[in-house]
Amino acid sequence: MTDILLEIHTAVLNGMATSPRHFAKTAELVAEDDFPDADLGEEAFRTRLAEDGLHGGALTALWSRALTAWDFSENPRWSPDTEPRTDERRTAAYERLRLGDDLRKALDTAVPLARAAGAVVIAREHTPWYTPERAASRAFYWPAYERKLREKGWSDAAVASLDEASRAVVERLTDPEHSEGRQVKGLVVGYVQSGKTANFTGVTAKAIDAGYRLVIVLGGTLNLLRAQTQRRLDMELVGQENILRGADPEDVDTLVGIDYAGDDADWDVFVKHGARPSMLRAFDIERLTTRDNDYKSLAQGIRVLEVEKRDHTLPLHDPANLHHAAARIMVVKKNKAVLTKLVKDLKQIRGILGELPTLIIDDESDQASVNTTDPKKWEKGSTERTAINGLISELLGLLPRAQYVGYTATPFANVFIDPGDTEDIFPSDFLISLPRPHGYMGVQDFHDLDSPLDPAERTIANSQQEAHVRSIWDHTDDRLQEAMDSFLLTGALKLYRADHGVPDGPFRHHTMLVHQSVRTDDHAELALRINTMWHQAGYTSAEGHARLAGLWAADFSSVSRTRAADLPNPASYDELRPYISRAKQLIGRGGNPVVVVNGDSDRYFAQLDLDFDRTPNVWKILVGGTKLSRGFTVEGLTVTYYRRTTRQADTLMQMGRWFGFRPGYRDLVRLYIGREEPMTKTSTADLYEAFEAICRDEEVFREQLAQYAVLVDGKPQVIPAQVPPLVAQHLSWVKPSARNKMFNAELVEIRSPGRPIEPAAYPLSPKALERNTERWRPLLHALALQPATFTVPGDGHDGPGRPISALTARVSHSRLLAVLSSLEWENEGHFRPHLHYLAQLDGRLATVEDWLLIAPQHSQSTRIDASVAGSVPMSLVRRSRQDGKPSFSRIAGVEHQQLAKRLIEAAAEPGGTGLQTGVVLLYPVVEGKSEADVAAAVSRGEADPCKVVMAFTLIPPKSATDSTQRLLRFQARDSRYRDSAIVEAPAD
């Protein structure tokens, strides 16, 4: 039976792909001929929404797709003044649709607004060309990819988010039809194992729809990784018809040399276009690489690479030719031999390359692609390159219309490539930070980054660390047996859930990762030990079951009951026990539960049988080092045992294989991590804290990009070439690669109205600390004798809130500025851009009358109070500097920052601080690892000024800016070369 209302609404909304319009009028026109008697009133619409579940929810799903797409749209012509994913944007859509209030409420109930973060874009100004109308007019592969994502279970919000994030990339490429070709270089920053492949698949789909006719994907350094990427693109973008190229899938003889058909269990879920795209008035995709074959020098390669022209009198990029030509896609390893073959073939068809719109996507672009040669060893006047970097540079030189887009989760290597080297891959045109995807387990799921709770108050219900992290201390033994027991238990729990109605797709693979050393000899020894422990664990004995039952009761039972109450969980170990045997069987299949992963050749990985795409079930314990750390996605990873030390931030970040999507088993994920691992003969490393510090650096980087991405008068506040000096302001180790170079863009002012200013690089010298403490003396003596009590709202702003006791004082702006101007810093100029801003708050930029000093007092009974420079007793605070850096990870406590921000927000309320008053959080910090270190800094009630860091966080009032709302100001060190990112440094 025809669903008349659904058919009418579908036709109407399909016609509103680019913008919402008067719904009732459009619906009347649609229904006029075929359904003249249809009830199109809003009451009938509301009634249907309320009862839509009885009809399969099709109408709700239809409106969900439309509303969510409008919610996420960036800078739409129909509502340029509203921000995406806001109530104002949703209201603007309703106004365009001319919907009544009751219907709006019904739709809001049926399709709640997704308040997800969007992509953050730092970019040079570009000429708009990729309009919604142009994108829609030739869309073929993007709609097919979008349908595939929905088939995979992606939500409307997730699809809309990917749509906008991929659009943000494509619109900054050069128009492929433009008569004058121009290269563009950009970088997309995602999260470790967060779905970057989905983004560049979406970018590829939209780019080829728009007219790009050669796509080169640089996909890892091993064929296993390259083949994973190839298969993903073939399955979700290229599609069956382009793979078969006319072959009959039912005729085995015609399938010789064709991959997937007949030997891939997932062949039936590969995208189907309905016919060869060229028969559907679109264009075909020709694959120059396959699942099993990387790029090879082609006997017929020159012909295959040459793109046919419909009109030979016109260049290929002319629309008359471009949109009738097939697209070529290749996925190649970052391998010297492979890329050399490709460059050689391209050189033989140089004639057409100048007309060929090309997209180069560099997956894991900070691996192998970056030029790591030492500039000090270069011959004068020349640039020496590593092999892969040199070949990428050659590719860009051969393809004048090439657009280079790098993808990474650890951006610092790419961001700090020499921007002045025009042949290198610095993202000079755009830098895009992708939002954290819904359902992703990242740093926030393993660390209590923003928890205001005292560690003693944290539980599995309110602490990520308590729920998921199991620390390995010297006194806990190595906990390896416990980690293995957890692996077996979680496998049994997955089988239990699959048996009780939970979709078992995510449980196809179940893995444990053991990462303890980079040395291959250690891996073999550790694997032998684990294998022996497994076979001696007694998992079928009464003793073994008693041990598992104890671990289940002490850990998994309570965590799952608290964090996964909506999933099936056994009421007792006896209920779980029948699944232990099956899990043990799956893990021990083949006689060995362990796989060592430490080779660096394709042959090595081929014999491991670790292809997660083609192996039905991988239930194994993986032991390895670097080869497990980058690009290699460990599917089904549930238990991680991590004890490897490293001083390299990007290496440590990439080791975070425990990040990713864990549908149906988030509560089961466990991280066993070393907290006292030997670094030298006399020092140890806390890997959990080290990892948190690295993550904080990256989060600061992302927050900065978001803060300064806002356009001012339609112009960018910061462009990619200015990102290195901006980040170097916080990460002082960042410098241009060559000693004789310097960043030409000098950051001279950072404005922070209503935002925290928290410098971190305090002096290391005891004498400098003593001098700084003495400079604070006048303000410390202004602190009141009796503490004041403030209240910070509880979670959700409900309840009585939490009291905070603090010493306070009000000091004039000039007195505070005098102190701040006299302070010493470990890195010269570290605080200067902030100080330049604060100095202008005397009325020149804005007016700040005074500042409220707040020195929080600890509430714990173990607190240590002492007089500082003759002050009233203050609570001393223990903090640690980041390993190998002068910076502290964090100064202000989360609750204290919440308090300061609330005072600024409520400044105008009765009893508020006032609109021209800022807030200073002041801490006498003692560097140390324990409270004993703090106590050692006190003698007879006085803090040793040589051991005290007078640290602070400032929050200026919101009014502390001018009408431009600009937050950054740069100046060129050498004004003759204003547009140059790097210039010669002056001679000594």
Image (cartoon, helix red, strand yellow):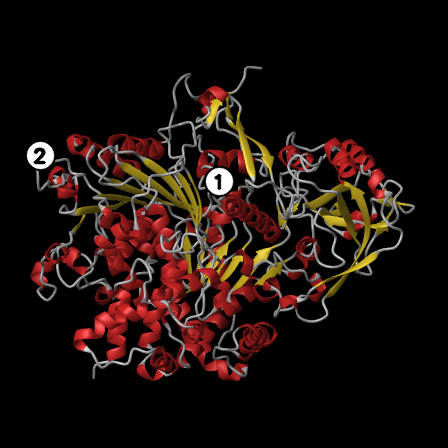
Position in image of residue 802 (x %, y %): 73, 65
Quadrant containing the N terminus is bottom left
| Residue 313's disc number | 2
| Residue 442's disc number | none
592 lies above or below 233:
below
Judging depth in this view, the residue of 21 and 715 nearest the camera is: 21
The reply to whether residue 224 is visible in this rendering is no
Number of numbered tags placed on the structure image:
2
Q: At label 2, which amino acid type do we have?
A: Thr
Judging depth in this view, the residue of 185 and 958 nearest the camera is: 958
Q: Residues within 10 Å of mark 2 (few under 14, many from 20)?
A: few
Helix, strand or loop under label 1:
helix
Q: At label 1, which amino acid type do we have?
A: Phe
| Mark 1 touches mark 2? (CB < 8 Å) | no
Quadrant containing the C terminus is top right
Position in image of residue 95 (x %, y %): 40, 64
Say which residue appears at 69% left-offset and 47% top-offset. 891
Name, please, the residue furthest toward the top: 987
Say which residue appears at 86% left-offset and 45% top-offset. 938
The reply to whether residue 755 is visible in this rendering is yes
Which residue is identified by label 1? 412
Say which residue appears at 20% left-offset and 37% top-offset. 356
Judging depth in this view, the residue of 900 and 864 nearest the camera is: 900
Q: Residues within 10 Å of mark 1 (few under 14, many from 20)?
A: some
